[in-house]
Amino acid sequence: MKSAVLENNRFTIKELPKPILDEYGEGAIIKVEGCGLCGSDIVKLQQKLVPDGSVLGHEVVGEIVEINSNTPFSIGDRVVLGHHVPCYYCQYCLGGSYSMCRHFKSTNIIPGGFSEYIYVSEEHLNNTVFNANLSLTPIEASFTEPLACCIRAVKRARMFDNSKNLIIGLGSIGILMGETVKAFGHEVFGCDLIQDRVNLSLKLGFNNSFLIKNEEEILKEMKKTAPLGFDTIFLTAGASSSIDFAVKAARDGAKIVVFSSIKNDNGFKNNDIYYRELTVMSSYSSSPVDLEDAISLLEEGRVRVDGLSTVYSLENINEALSDTISNKIMKAYIKI
Ligand SMILES: [Zn+2]
Ligand SMILES: [Zn+2]
């Protein structure tokens, strides 16, 4: 089968052996329809966080073509999935830190979503595989996993009624995050350096969004919306300058939710956090219940993803990669 294999910070299309269900016993083989290219895939590739030869991709939509399972799934089911499964009984899981569970981190789909076929275990079928409503297009369904990550972040932030909330960075994740904040009944504002992204956020229901040209000017402009500063700030931009901007845009006592990796890791300042009673927190990945919630929000049309994706073939995955990195596109969907 064809797979996009990591090699020297790029993808190379190679023939890999198709996973054989008998070798695993229980589980299922899924024929991948398509898979979203996630920002975390790009970080893993650029920073060589996974070895050459690996297959990335986890925002999968596909069809079950072989199965040996005690679950109700059967051949022909169209499914979406999460790639990691929490154990539910360790100290991390008991504390609600499902994405920190060591079992969560060690479980995965095989070999990865940028491949014609993947194997998922019985444990995945029991916990993180879901039937994708046929009313959703494959592209819409492929947003289940990234949306679930946003849902977890929004739940963890525990926003209050009438709060004013800001998303810094209106890439696909920033947009999804904002739509999730809205779906949970709160006001949401956005900011970005790119006008098209500001426009798209407004089209998808943000209360307002700001184009950042000059930081000081925009902070002044934001004061008209949130005179004391924003109550919750989601950092989805991945630029180190956004830390300082987030602190300036925050109300005293606000929460800042870190939701992206930053290349040159520089930190929040101790005294900003202390004297201004800021809560700096993060949210990482999603749990099975967030995946279910994500499917509901997509099915009910409460989170819309139209206009976010650009479709590429597996053969053109390197173009998808460079177009995403250069901000030429918002989000790549790799049609397998
Ligand atoms: Zn993802
Ligand atoms: Zn656990």
Image (tube, rainbow, N blue to C red):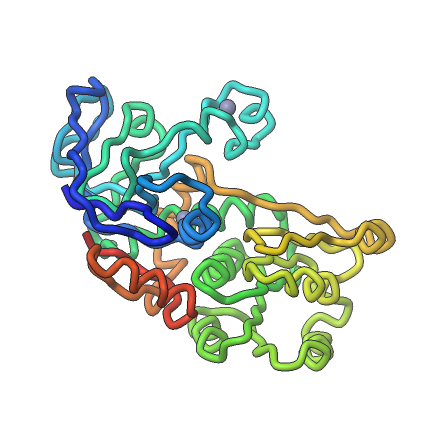
Tell me which residue sits at (42%, 35%) in the image: 288
Viewer-nearest residue: 330 or 226: 330
Asked whether the viewer can see residue 187, the reply is no
Farthest residue toward the right?
Answer: 275
Q: Position of residue 64 (x, y in %)?
A: 17, 36
Specify whether 87 is left or right of 230.
left
Specify whether 178 is left or right of 75.
right
Tell me which residue sits at (57%, 71%) in the image: 191
Farthest residue toward the front?
Answer: 8
Tell me which residue sits at (57%, 26%) in the image: 92
Viewer-nearest residue: 27 or 39: 39
Count of numbered labels shown in the rendering: 0
Viewer-nearest residue: 191 or 320: 320
Specify whether 87 is left or right of 282.
left
Q: Position of residue 58 (x, y in %)?
A: 34, 44
Viewer-nearest residue: 106 or 322: 322
Q: Write down the quadrant of residue 56 in the picture.
A: top left
Q: Position of residue 143 (x, y in %)?
A: 35, 53
Relative to 123, residue 77 above or below: below
Asked whether the viewer can see residue 301, the reply is yes
